[in-house]
Amino acid sequence: MPQRNVKEQLVDGASRVLLEQGYHAASVGDIVAAAGIPKGSVYNHFDSKEDLAMEVVRRYVDSYPFDALLEPESSPLARLRTFFSDTIERTVARGVTSGCLLGNFSTELVGHSDPISQLVADSLAQMGGAATTVLTESRQRGELPKDLDPVVLGPYLVDAFEGSVARAKVGGTRAPLDSFLDFTFDVLLKR
Amino acid sequence: MPQRNVKEQLVDGASRVLLEQGYHAASVGDIVAAAGIPKGSVYNHFDSKEDLAMEVVRRYVDSYPFDALLEPESSPLARLRTFFSDTIERTVARGVTSGCLLGNFSTELVGHSDPISQLVADSLAQMGGAATTVLTESRQRGELPKDLDPVVLGPYLVDAFEGSVARAKVGGTRAPLDSFLDFTFDVLLKR
Amino acid sequence: MPQRNVKEQLVDGASRVLLEQGYHAASVGDIVAAAGIPKGSVYNHFDSKEDLAMEVVRRYVDSYPFDALLEPESSPLARLRTFFSDTIERTVARGVTSGCLLGNFSTELVGHSDPISQLVADSLAQMGGAATTVLTESRQRGELPKDLDPVVLGPYLVDAFEGSVARAKVGGTRAPLDSFLDFTFDVLLKR
Amino acid sequence: MPQRNVKEQLVDGASRVLLEQGYHAASVGDIVAAAGIPKGSVYNHFDSKEDLAMEVVRRYVDSYPFDALLEPESSPLARLRTFFSDTIERTVARGVTSGCLLGNFSTELVGHSDPISQLVADSLAQMGGAATTVLTESRQRGELPKDLDPVVLGPYLVDAFEGSVARAKVGGTRAPLDSFLDFTFDVLLKR
DNA sequence: ACCTCCGGGACCTCCCGTTGGT
DNA sequence: ACCAACGGGAGGTCCCGGAGGT
């Protein structure tokens, strides 16, 4: 067998390029160039660019620290803050101007790829649901102001987060992200 | 003899197509087809697709009801709610799955068009600033809980709004938008 | 306008290449190379390779000497013989190994292009019909043996002709064509 | 442990696919999919797609009922009619729109594969020769009109047959085949 | 013998911007 | 100002055949 890891290299390269350039702007040529593999090898592993992007989204979602978020060891609110904080750091590390793959694809691919859009919608819902779960815990511990409904608040926080990621991206600064974190946990959730 | 408002038709068509398809996915051919004009005419009025898109963004921003938002007639919070509410209705009227041009371009065009990205960033900042202005008014009237800083809260609300538009878009439902409106004005700002 | 005749050159080149190589074996690159035009120009004139091939078939059919065949000046049988004889000479002039576009496409494109297949079927029917018309004339003049039904014989002769063109093509010799002509007119129709 | 009759499956699949799609339109991928074997296995048994197609043609020719045609039991003309009639039924059973492999390849592969073209030409000549043999028998029995030369008539009938198969294929109807049979044996050969 | 993975190259199509006659 | 025609280049996809471990 000539080489190994071709598929792995491909998905890695695609992850980087799709995150940085977007779906339509990133050509398969760009991706294979970044992955360091020949173009002809792409379709040995994926049926289409869309199929490859699906895998990239799956891996992206899998990289979220959901385990730590739901582990009932420390305070729920602390865990939620850590979840967002870690995510912010990872986002910044990849480059603020790359933004969040879910947010990027949520606006770019509607009407162009139903499978990806569905996956993105589900992933966003999953995040909102996880937040709701933690907030419900928090409420049971009496940490949460009583007027805040976890079911509504969870997705709301995810929306606010994604919005701030988008603004950070287009502005080229992490400020909106830090602002989101501070306001959410130091003001909104703290009475 | 050619059409009269060729430029107008062009911008109208481009507004629709760019909002629905995105920048990279919409070809100049798609745009002129939607506008009902010949392709060669585009470059009599704009230097490039990018230039045309700039004009589309400007018109999009101009269509926001900033005047009504800042007119000191009714209650500031009421005006802010109306601003978002009207915007939601217009968004829904254009098709939820189209989303918001600013949100769409904020994630798609970073790294591809600095002029558009800058314009989008500025427009988002403008919205946040307008919200801050109104919230400051509100604070002066004592309508606003004291722990909420208008300077932080204004952009935060815009982020949350844009995030909910994105989620509505990818989910194909207006629910996140209504949820945003209710939570923001019935809970968050009504402590 | 940079150049003219681009479309004409394109169709001419396509006629040559499609006849010689067949539909699937001839790439658009081959065609534009033969036509001496850049590849990007093809789709200014035709929607697809299939569309271009349709035009080629139309021109091919138009090149048959149907007028002379149906002109009631000389003997019907003489005109029919001339029709086939002329067609044979033109076929040989283009290269026996190219065969007949209708025959070639009739076997290659079924299941791949319904529009072309239909056009080819119609054209073949047209030839058979024309032969029938002339044979009917002949019968009325008493030139035709009574047991030969023009309605059946017309298409039969066309089939035999196309079959002999195919055999000449694959054999690389005009012998089957001459044989067709002699047997048909000196034996079959001369009872 | 792999399959047993890999080669057999391969040739069977290739026979079907090449007959239905043609040589250039059928990819090796299509063939192995139809055969239910992995693509890499092809080149263990054949040097190339061309080589595989050669085998397919050989089997196709072997499937003709030449034995029954030449067995001097019943009337020569009856045997010839049966030969064509059986061939027609087998052709129809495989799908009229598939046509005849010899006819299909005779027009598609000239200039692309000399070995296949040669084999097809020889096979066609073989058929014509067999017909001539039987017609000669017939002549000796006095069954055949004296003006019909078996040497010319044999190939002529094969050409007419192949032409009618092509017309049946592109027209999607067996009518030309039945017409060929009736006219040939009820009119042409019956004085 | 088998078969997974590989890969250089070419497929058809379409892109965006331009040219130049009207 | 208009716009039909143009064109270099790239888009995603798929081709046939091979390499090499099992």
Image (spheres, coloured by chain):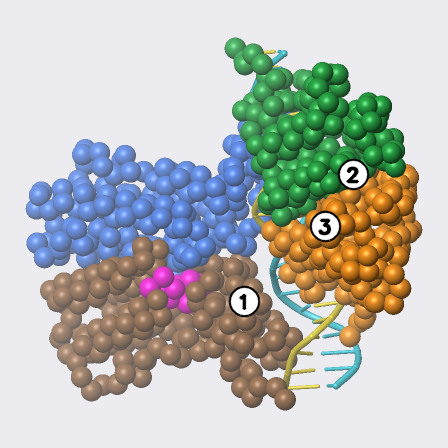
Chain colours: A blue, B brown, C orange, D green, E cyan, F yellow
Q: Are marks 1 and 2 on the same chain?
A: no
Q: Quadrant of residue A67?
A: top left
The residues colored magenta run: B96-106
When asked about the image quadrant of residue B174, the answer is bottom left
Quarter of the picture holding the N terminus of chain A: top right
Residue C128 at least partly seen: no
Q: In the rendering, at what x and y percent does residue B19 appear?
A: 44, 67
Asked if residue A66 can be seen in this view, the reply is yes
The answer to the question of whether label 1 and label 2 lie on touching residues, with beta carbons closer than 8 A, is no
Magenta-colored stretch includes residue B104: yes
Horizontal side, residue D45 vs residue A140: left or right: right
Give residue C8's position: percent from left, percent from top.
80, 65
- Looking at the rendered structure, the secondary structure element under dot 2 is loop
- Looking at the picture, which amino acid does disc 3 mark? Asp
Instruction: Tell me the tag on residue B30.
Output: 1
Q: Which mark is residue C149?
A: 3
The quarter of the image holding the C terminus of chain A is bottom left
Q: Residue at x 63, y 17 (%)?
A: D7
Q: CA distance from mark 3 to mark 2?
A: 14 Å
Residue type marked 2: Arg
Q: Check disc 2 and report the residue beneath it.
A: D191
Residue at 31%, 55% in the rendered image:
B171
Callout 1 crowding tier (Cα within 10 Å): few <14, some 14–19, many ≥20: some
| Amino acid found under the numbered disc labelled 1 | Asp
Q: Which mark is in front, 1 or 2?
A: 2
User: Residue A77 in magenta?
Assistant: no
D33 horizontally vs B108: left or right: right
Majority secondary structure of magenta residues: helix
